[in-house]
Structures are given as C-alpha cells and as structure tokens.
C-alpha cells in the first residue's frame, strides 16, 4: 500500500509568490518615495535655501499626515476587501507623488508631502494585514523578510538611480520616476490580485469608532504599539541627515553617494532573507536582541566618525544597515501576531500611524538638535542623535520582550 504524499506546507504556491512580489513592489515604491528625501536632503537644502529645521519639517509633514490618516482609517480598515482598500490608497499615493514631482517652492513641497503621506502612510499597514491574512505564522518570517526587501532594493536600485537622474534632470525627476513604476504596479494589483475578504467572515457588531476604541483599549495591543513606536523613533531621528552627514562631515562626494547607498542596499538584500529564515527557526526575541545590540555599538561609532577613506565609510554604513534592518523582521513578525484576525486591519493601521507620528516627532526633534551653520559646513551634534537612539533602543528591547511573552503565553494556552 503506497503512502499518500502530503503537500509541503512550508512551500509557497505560485499565487502566493505573486502576492509577495506585488506587496514587495508596493513597499518598494512607497519606501523609495519616503527614503529619497534623505539622499536628496543636501541637494534640497542647497537648491531651496532650506535650514535644517525646514528640511526636518518637510520630512515630518509626510510622517504626521500619514499617522493621522492611519488613525482615521483604522476603524474602517477591517470592513472592506483589503484589495480595494489597497487600490484606493495606492492611487492616492501615486497622485501625491506626482504633485511632489511638479512642485516649484517650499510651501508646495510641504503640501505635496502631506498629500502623499495621507495615502502612502496607510499602504504599509494594509500590506502587512494582507500578509498576515494570507500566510501562516510558520511562513510569516520569510514573507516579512521578502516584503521588507523593498527597503534594500530601494537602496540598491532606487536611490542610486534616483540620485543619478537627479544630478542630470534635477531633484524633482526621481518622484516622476516613482509615479511611472507605481502605475505599473497598480495595474498588477487591479488585474491579478484576488479579493481578500476572509476577515469579513468574522462578524463584528461594533461601529467603526467603537472598533477603533476597542483596538486602542486592548492592553496587549498597546504594548505592540509602544514597541513599534520605539523602533521607529531612533531611525527617524538620524535618517534625514544621512546624506548631509556623509557629504559635509565624512567628505563623501556626490558621485560616491549613490555607491554608498547601493552598498547598504546590497547588504540589506542579502541579510533580510537570511534573517527571515532565522526568525522562523529560532526565538524571534533573541534574534531581535542580538540585532539591537549590534546596531547600538555601530551607531555610536558611526555618528562619531570624522573624514576617513571612502571604503571605510562603506564598511561602517553596511554594518549599520545590517543592525538596523535585522531588527525589523523578527520584531514585525512578533507584533503582527498580536491582533485577532477581525482586529488586524485596525491594529496595523494604528500601529503604522503611531510609527509615522513618533517618527515625525523624532525627525522634528532631530532638526532642533543638529545644526549646520552654512550650506557647506559640517553637521554638528549628530553624535547626540546616536546616543539618543541607543537609549531608545534599550527600551525597545524590553517592549519586544513583553510582546514575545504575550504570544508565547497565548500559544501555551492554545495547546492545553
């Protein structure tokens, strides 16, 4: 008697692969739209005569509007087909990015970033909810690793190409490039992504406002929100000044800057899938704690650097990116497992909103701490941001530990 071969539940189907790719591409375009502000920072500040405070506010404008939009959407997020919700916000994101590409002055730039944030800031939470709905926790670490590769690809391809065309056609051209790519991705969502409605089968009598309140009032959910907020604060505090610090403090040239970002991006593309696999095989909190410790050490060294050979800058930047990105996969895999399916859309919307708002506050605070006396003088007090990031990451480790304990306790009860 021959045994019936059981399907390998750890493998992805062709449709699941498509979903991962399309979610990764949406993440790529949204992340690139936000991330490009940092490498364009030095160019923007010089061309528009912006102070560090004004540039910080341009970065914060996106984050604050994204946060407010996410909270406003949270109560409704679980009442619609997730595909339709993704399409609505993605089209709005495309239009907002187009506005960024045609701005001619600082007030227009602020307005464009606000509009883009209103729509773009919600897309990440929708993508995470889709990933959590369609993939079991045994696959979720790998899924998160691939989806978050959008960050690495944006650095390997998006940012270097964007910087190149910005040097040729001006700083507005990268936004127009993103519009073209996002339009193609949008067509893929329209014609290939199936409706995602399983969460609608779980009946809920709550109206949107009560649903929002219930999600916020849940103590376990609040711990997840705090963990995500702490993770984003340090990065947002340092990130906007990356290119200005590299150019004005480390003496990296504009021609070398795309190579610097590409090096960090290549390391991310290599490390993210590996971390995704590790997070499915070992304790996610332990993996996160190791990555956070690594990051803290490198941040202190990096933010205190003075002009050194470019190859050393490359190595330090790669080591920094490995630490930062290695925290994301295990932490997000844990946080995503906190909400019940019927609360997942609201949870992810609020979670992303708090991430954006806390990041916006961090960027604004960073703009008050760092100082650049002239267009070409070094950035001062960047090391202070590094020390603050380390302090915040210590609290972040503790909150992720609490999230891990909640999930382990739930799994233990489920086995009884």
Image (tube, rainbow, N blue to C red):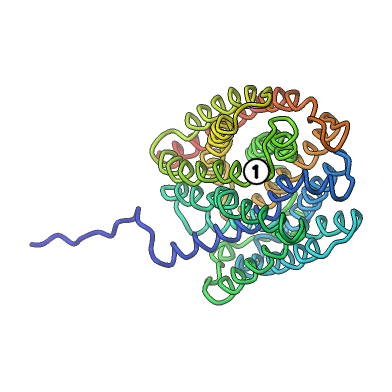
Q: Is residue 391 visible?
A: no
* Placement of 34 over or under 228, stated as above or below: below
Tell me the quadrant of the picture where the N terminus can be found.
bottom left
Nearer to the camera, 369 or 260: 260
Image position of 313 (left or right of 287): right
Res 233 → quadrant: top right
Horizontal and vertical percent position of residue 409: 49, 34
Q: Does 208 sit above or below residue 63?
A: below
* Quarter of the image with the C terminus in it: top left
Crowd class of label 1 (few under 14; some 14 to 19; many from 20; radius 10 Å): many
* Residue situated furthest bottom in the rendering: 191
Residue at the spot 66% in from the left edge and 69% down from the top edge: 180
Q: Looking at the image, how many numbered discs can be counted on the residues?
A: 1
The residue wearing badge 1 is 257
Identify which residue, 249 or 14, lies in the foreground: 249
Question: Residue 336: image x %, image y %?
Answer: 56, 46
Task: Check disc 1 and report its element: helix, strand or loop.
Answer: helix
- In the image, 230 versus 301, the foreground residue is 301
**Residue 377, how many percent across, how many down?**
82, 31
- At a point 70% along the width and 33% down the height, the residue shown is 251
Residue 62 position within the rendered picture, expressed as x and y whole percent measured from the top left: 79, 51
Task: State the residue at coordinates (84%, 45%).
Answer: 46
Regarding residue 144, the answer to whether it shows in the image is yes
Is 80 positioned to the left or the right of 25 in the image? right
């Amino acid at each position: 008697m021959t045994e019936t071969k059981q399907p390998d539940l750890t493998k992805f189907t062709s449709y699941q692969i498509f979903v991962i790719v399309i979610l990764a591409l949406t993440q790529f375009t949204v992340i690139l739209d936000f991330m490009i502000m940092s490498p364009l920072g030095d160019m923007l500040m010089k061309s528009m005569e912006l102070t560090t405070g004004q540039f910080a506010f341009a970065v914060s404008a996106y984050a604050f509007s994204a946060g407010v939009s996410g909270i406003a959407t949270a109560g409704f997020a679980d009442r619609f087909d997730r595909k339709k919700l993704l399409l609505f916000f993605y089209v709005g994101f495309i239009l907002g990015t187009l506005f960024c590409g045609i701005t001619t002055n600082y007030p227009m730039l602020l307005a464009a970033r606000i509009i883009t944030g209103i729509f773009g800031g919600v897309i990440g939470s929708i993508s995470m909810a889709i990933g959590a709905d369609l993939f079991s926790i045994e696959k979720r670490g790998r899924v998160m690793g691939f989806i978050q590769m959008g960050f690495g690809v944006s650095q390997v391809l998006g940012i270097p190409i964007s910087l190149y065309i910005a040097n040729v056609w001006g700083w507005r051209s990268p936004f127009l490039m993103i519009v073209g790519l996002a339009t193609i991705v949008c067509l893929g969502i329209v014609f290939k992504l199936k409706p995602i409605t399983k969460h609608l089968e779980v009946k809920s009598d709550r109206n949107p406002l009560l649903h929002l309140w219930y999600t916020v009032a849940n103590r376990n959910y609040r711990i997840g929100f705090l963990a995500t907020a702490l993770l984003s604060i340090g990065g947002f505090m340092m990130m906007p000044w990356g290119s200005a610090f590299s150019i004005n403090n480390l003496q990296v040239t504009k021609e070398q800057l795309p190579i610097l970002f590409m090096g960090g991006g290549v390391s991310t593309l290599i490390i993210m899938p590996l971390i995704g696999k590790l997070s499915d095989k070992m304790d996610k909190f332990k993996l996160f704690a190791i990555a956070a410790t690594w990051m803290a050490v490198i941040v202190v060294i990096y933010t205190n650097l003075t002009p050194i050979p470019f190859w050393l800058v490359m190595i330090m930047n790669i080591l920094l990116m490995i630490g930062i990105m290695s925290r994301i996969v295990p932490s997000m895999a844990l946080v995503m497992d906190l909400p019940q399916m019927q609360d997942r859309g609201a949870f992810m919307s609020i979670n992303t909103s708090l991430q954006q708002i806390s990041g916006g506050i961090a960027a604004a605070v960073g703009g008050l701490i760092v100082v650049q006396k002239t267009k070409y003088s070094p950035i001062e007090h960047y090391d202070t941001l590094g020390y603050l990031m380390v302090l915040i990451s210590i609290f972040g480790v503790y909150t992720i530990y609490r999230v891990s304990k909640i999930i382990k306790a739930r799994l233990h009860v489920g086995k009884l």
